[in-house]
Image (cartoon, helix red, strand yellow):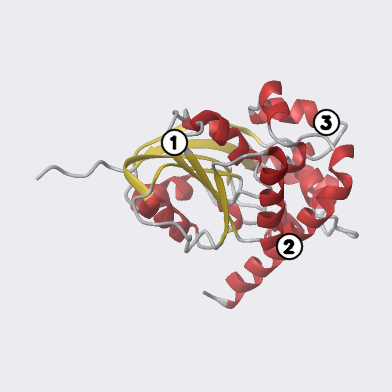
Amino acid sequence: MTMKEREIKRAVKEGYARIAKQATSYYASRGCCGCSDVSEEICRRLGYSEEEIQAAPPESNLGLGCGNPVSLATLKEGETVLDMGSGAGFDCFLASTKVGSSGKVIGVDITSEMVDKARANARKAGYSNIDFRQGDLENMPVADNYVDVVISNCVINLVPNKKMVFKEAFRVLKPGGRLAVSDVVLQRELPEFVKRSTEAYIGCLAGAIMKEEYLEIIKNVGFQDIRVVAESSFPIESLICETAESARVESPKISAEQLEEVADSVLSIKISAVKPSAKKI
């Protein structure tokens, strides 16, 4: 790992640890997707139904996603699901309901504060089929060929080594297993002032790569049937909220005006793919 990658990882861990610690005291005053005045509109654009928003523990919904990978994954009763970058557990709780008591959900997050918060949410709400684990997405504490479905929501863009993340997703999936990812990609390169900004990295901007490069990585690690299920512009309100509010940046280096300048470069994208089934001898 390069010095820059270590610095980015440390900044992301610190930023999301801060979000986890502060969420308990102010989540009730926020909307489901980061800002109370635009929350309903953003939630609809991200693909969550009102029923889903109400179903999960409210403390688990920190408004840090960019789509609804649970819906994309079409989960079935009894399946084992892994959420890469599970945060406070929102998508895990939705997945838990889908797979039922005969299924299992594993959430992996790099930030101990998020894992602690997710576990507390699960205990409080009585979920028994979810296992939250702390670990790097580039080296996940999950066995080979173990899960039926891997989901992720606006997290892979935060990791410098995206190829290793998708290699890990491929490793833990059973042959024939499915990948369902919501993430942020670029239509064109971002200005340097965004790439250099820690606040932008925590807000899912600076770590994003070009759409074509992102899809090529997924293909090169071995996935097949790769489909871009949907793509849309990423809500500018969400970008502003996540960098300036959720991360609690006292003096943000990126102004709202600057974010608007680059917002049309950013896409929210939903991708599905399949790990090839084992070859018959």
Q: Nearer the viewer, mark 3 or mark 2?
A: 3
Looking at numbered disc 3 in the image, what kind of residue is underneath it? Val
Q: Give percent across and percent down for residue 129.
A: 54, 41
Number of residue marks:
3
Dot 1 or dot 2, earlier in sequence: 2
Residue at x-position 47% and y-position 64%:
139
Q: Give percent across and percent down for residue 279.
A: 17, 44
Q: What is the number of the mark on residue 143?
A: none
Looking at numbered disc 2 in the image, what kind of residue is underneath it? Thr
Q: Name the image quarter holding residue 76.
A: top left
Dot 1 corresponds to which residue? 272
Q: What is the number of the mark on residue 198?
A: 2
Dot 1 or dot 3, earlier in sequence: 3
Q: What whole-number distance in Å separates the C-alpha atoms at marks 1 and 3?
A: 28 Å
Dot 3 corresponds to which residue? 38
Residue 191 in view here: no
Q: Name the image quarter holding residue 7.
A: bottom right
Dot 3 or dot 2, earlier in sequence: 3
Instruction: Kindly check if marks 1 and 3 are in contact, taking CB atoms under 8 A apart as contact.
Output: no
Q: Please tell me how crowded label 2 is: few (under 14), some (14-19), or many (20+) other residues with Cα within 10 Å.
A: many
Quarter of the picture containing the C terminus is top left
Residue at x-position 82% and y-position 34%:
31
Q: Give percent across and percent down for residue 148.
A: 39, 40
Label 3: which secondary element:
loop
Looking at numbered disc 1 in the image, what kind of residue is underneath it? Ser
Q: What whole-number distance in Å separates the C-alpha atoms at marks 3 and 2?
A: 24 Å
Is 100 on the left-hand or right-hand side of 280? right
